[in-house]
Image (cartoon, rainbow, N blue to C red):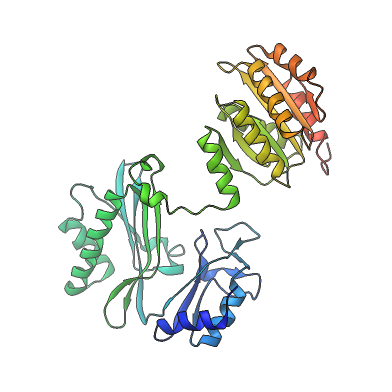
Amino acid sequence: MITWRSIARTFQRQHGPSVIKAQVLAGGRGKGKFNSDGKSGARRVDSPDEAFKSATNMLGHYLTTAQTPEDGLRVDKLYITKAMSIAQEFYFAMTFDRQHISPVLLVSSSGGTDVESNVDKLHKLQFGLSTGITDEIDAYIQAELGFSDVEMEDVHRILVQMVKLFKEKDATLLELNPLVRTEEGEFVCLDAKFGFDNLARYRQEEIFSLEERSPEEEEEHQLAKLGLSYVRLEGNIGNIVNGAGLAMATNDIISLYGGKCANFLDVGGAATKEALSKAFGILERDQRVKVILVNIYGGIVRCDMIAESIVAAATEMGGFKCPVVVRLQGTNSEKGLKLIEQSGLDNLVVEAEFEKAAQMIVKHTPGVEF
């Protein structure tokens, strides 16, 4: 719970007018709107009272921007920083150009919330991680963005540090937006966005240890440790599938018959009792999920082994709370279907045909006209 005293102390540490920023994993906060008062996710405040009023209308409320879901994202953290006297805003970023298989530097004289609406001012410059920022790159940036020689010296130092950080931390994105020039002629980064290569996680343990996860993201993380791939979607039909291609086909055919999937869950070859128990547990805790389709094509993974894991998982969980349709095809599928049929478990039915299984699951979904 926030108090006037805590906000006032933080405000006073800035020694003057401040900016309060909502801390959410989405851009466009300056043009976003809160459901509480319709104001943006980044606000200038000039007094402790004003800071407290803004903080009260931001914490625990939902901010909607161009990059959030329609209902917005809940704001549970705020960042309060000193307000700057800004002369101009710039956009500097580094990422990878997959077409040219090269890192690329993006610069623009229109930073902040205006960068997306001024694409014509965005300049792309390829550079090498070994060569870094060359004299040619400096000359181009100085000419296009209109920096003086003294200003360019400061900009060059920033660019060199960006390359160093981009390279040493296995970054896939390093974005300074806005990088501002103050009225006093100083360059200051007011906001930054980072992306890091997941494959470099073992090299960047300190960075990845900072990762904050929502309850849903934590469940995805736990599934990933079991070798399962989980993506949350917007529907109410849960599905457990082996293979990304079959998972996408399952989503498509459910949509064809009028249903909407609540998730993409690929168990791959990791369909053990532990993995399936975890998968079923996550789907059944999701209040949106009304029915579950298990769609398995047995190749290397035998269908009878899958069936044994499903029955064991259901027994361990005390049965399924919502209807579950199991479709098995491939290696030992008949044996697997028979195992499930003979299990005597409630809320569990089998169907060998893909299309019929999809039709069955949609028919069992409340509120869906089939």
**Residue 225 point in image, percent of width and height:** 51, 36
Q: Is residue 344 above or below residue 284?
A: above
Q: Is residue 147 above or below residue 170?
A: below
**Residue 91 point in image, percent of width and height:** 36, 64
State the residue at coordinates (23%, 47%). Answer: 129
State the residue at coordinates (36%, 51%). Answer: 206
Q: Is residue 11 above or below residue 277?
A: below
**Of residues 70 and 231, which is closer to you in this image?**
231
**Residue 270 point in image, percent of width and height:** 55, 26
Q: Determine which quarter of the picture holds residue 50.
A: bottom right
Give the left or right position of residue 235, taking residue 55 as reference.
right
Q: Determine which quarter of the picture holds residue 328.
A: top right
- All told, the count of numbered labels is 0
Quarter of the image with the N terminus in it = bottom right
Quarter of the image with the C terminus in it = top right
Q: Is residue 261 visible from the viewing direction of this image? A: no
Q: Determine which quarter of the picture holds residue 232.
A: top right
**Of residues 250 and 326, which is closer to you in this image?**
326
Q: Is residue 346 visible from the viewing direction of this image? A: yes
Q: Is residue 317 above or below residue 154?
A: above
**Residue 106 point in image, percent of width and height:** 33, 57
